[in-house]
Amino acid sequence: MNSSHGYLSIVNITHASNEKEAAIVPPSPDSFDFILRKYAYPIIIILGFLGNTISAFVFLHPQLRRYSCNIFLATRSLSDNGVLFSLLVAWLDFIYVRIFHVPVVCQLTVFLSYMCSFLSVWCIVCVTIDNYIRMCYPSIVNLYCKSKYAFVILSIMITLSLGIYNIPLWTTHVTVIAGNYYCWPKQEHIELLYILTYVDTALTFVFPLSAILICMSLLICKAVRSHQRSTTNRERYSSRTWPSSTSHYLKVTKLLFAVSVTFLILHTPTHVIKLKSVIEAFAGNPQQLSGVVKTLNYVFQVMYCLNFAVNFIVYYTFGNNFRQIVANSFCSVSKCKIFYKKSRDSIPSADTMSADILEQDSML
């Protein structure tokens, strides 16, 4: 049983039918679905909470939080924790700790899953656009890429998400099915929840995916042109006087590419299946998933959940300065300091470090 997002695996909130009893039969303990949910989800939740919390702490550091891209990344980390919280509630229900089917918890969990996933996706879009401006229009960076504008944009996003996704707060309730209490959509609002599914598919998949792909294409083209220009002039510079712009572009492109590709790989597959189901339902010809597609969908759902949990690994792997701040903040043991001494020596002073992080690491 899938939710509209694929991670609340208790009931199908947006595709409920009159045959409720058939919709809530749990998977067999020997099934691939059961094993995957039971063991993969708690690992994702624990590691994701830890990584997102550390990431938010780093990006909200006084040295970094004045920059717009860091505000978006911190907000994404917190939003991802909201999604993981809803996943935790669903997983607890899966192991028969049924707090999901308690009034208020039912509505808030569904609402939180919608809202936080929306904010997480659009924070990625905002950071990608922010990076596009920095690389392609550096002359206006100081005018527009400021934290105050990021807060304005986030306020608009939060207001929109509250306006759109408040629907589950008053269209779902706890009802009795086969002698047990279940969080379930109200029958009179089924059509509205169908509409919400269509809108959510557009807002969290179609539109952001299109925006990210366009920005990535423009950024890659910009980096390629810059590299070609610098290559023609390479003979003019020695290794010591070679301008840093080429290295800068390559570093930014590497970080952007890593985060964006990770997002696309983990976020897209389950949405493709969801989009197929939505189109079939809209056409009035819903089809049952085949056994192979069901198995793939279980894997895609885990990948989708990983999208909210692995960002710290991406930042840490591809961001030298991100690693440095983590080391300075969390490594107080002398061995840690010795281990990072070499990287500390190669990083600018505190006064210039934030600008360097801004241009090389924090932009994605």
Image (spheres, rainbow, N blue to C red):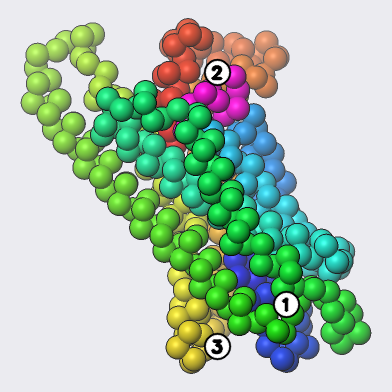
Q: Secondary structure at mark 2?
A: loop
Disc sitting over residue 99 in the figure: none
Secondary structure at numbered mark 3? loop
- Tell whether 203 sits left or right of 138: right
Q: Say which quadrant the C terminus sits in.
A: top left
Q: Amino acid at mark 1?
A: Pro
Q: Judge depth for marks 1 and 2 and give the one in front.
A: 1
Q: Which image quadrant: the N terminus?
A: bottom right
Mark carried by residue 288? 3
Q: Nearer the viewer, residue 41 or 253?
A: 253
Q: Is residue 122 magenta?
A: no
Query: Amino acid under label 3?
Result: Gln
Residue matched to label 1:
185
In the picture shown, does residue 7 fall above or below 343?
Answer: below
The spot of residue 64 in percent (x, y) is 53, 23
Between 187 and 106, the residue placed more toward the observer is 187
The earlier-in-sequence mark between 2 and 3 is 2
Circle 1: element type: strand
User: Height in image: 74 above or below 280?
Assistant: above
- Kindly identify the amino acid type of the residue bearing the numbered disc 2: Gln
* Residue span colored magenta: 58-70
Q: Is disc 2 in contact with disc 3, using a CB cutoff of under 8 Å?
A: no
Instruction: Name the residue carrying label 2.
Output: 63
Q: Residues within 10 Å of mark 2 (few under 14, many from 20)?
A: some
On screen, residue 87 versus residue 177, left or right, reads left
